[in-house]
Amino acid sequence: SPSLLNGTRAYADLAGGEPFNLDTRCTAFDVATEDERVQVVSVNDGDALGTDTEIQKIDVFATASIHQGQYKLALNHSGGQQFSPCIEWDATAGEVEAAIENMTNVDSVRVERSGAADYDSSFGYTYSIFFDGHGMMVTPDGGNNPDTLEVLMGTAGNCDTFATIVNG
């Protein structure tokens, strides 16, 4: 029977040779990271979906599996800047939608989430935000067009710092 020696197990070679050690330790741990990214892109600035719906995208991604993290969104529109509450990195579409609609300068949005927080989706998600409320409609002269959402992370947003899982 193998014996535990400082995180390794000692085994005897079945062919009668020398004993050997097999490292059985798991080294998964959380590390603060600087490689995460949360960005917003306006897909159709001033253009229409249906009639005149602004569409923006939020990309949450990193170079390793995200373990924790939050961000806030800020929006300048209708004469003022409003902030969302902290949003978890893996929030559902409904949670992001509710956070944005919590801003008093937004009347209605529809949010769709894509991605699987795996390697193929850069360990995160993409949120498509459709500003479909009457208060966000662009007027014929180009007025009333909402600014691009601003992302606030870490101490700037007073939210939990992003951390990734390394060697896990």
Image: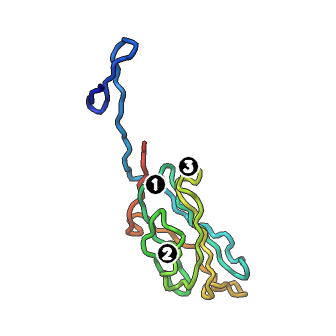
Q: CA distance from mark 2 to mark 1?
A: 23 Å
- Name the residue located 73 percent from the left edge and 82 percent from the top edge: 51
Picture quarter with the C terminus: top left
Which residue in the structure is indicated by mark 1?
66
Instruction: Report the front residue among 27 and 35.
Output: 27
Contact flag, marks 2 and 3 (Cβ < 8 Å): no
- Name the residue located 70 percent from the left edge and 81 percent from the top edge: 52
Q: Earlier in the sequence, mark 2 or mark 3?
A: 2
Q: Residues within 10 Å of mark 1 (few under 14, many from 20)?
A: many
Task: Give the structural element (helix, strand or loop) at label 2.
Answer: strand
- Please state which amino acid type lies under the numbered disc 1: Ile
- Please state which amino acid type lies under the numbered disc 3: Tyr
Residue 119's disc is: 3
Residue 155's disc is: none
Task: Give the structural element (helix, strand or loop) at label 1.
Answer: strand
Which residue in the structure is indicated by mark 2?
74
Picture quarter with the N terminus: top left
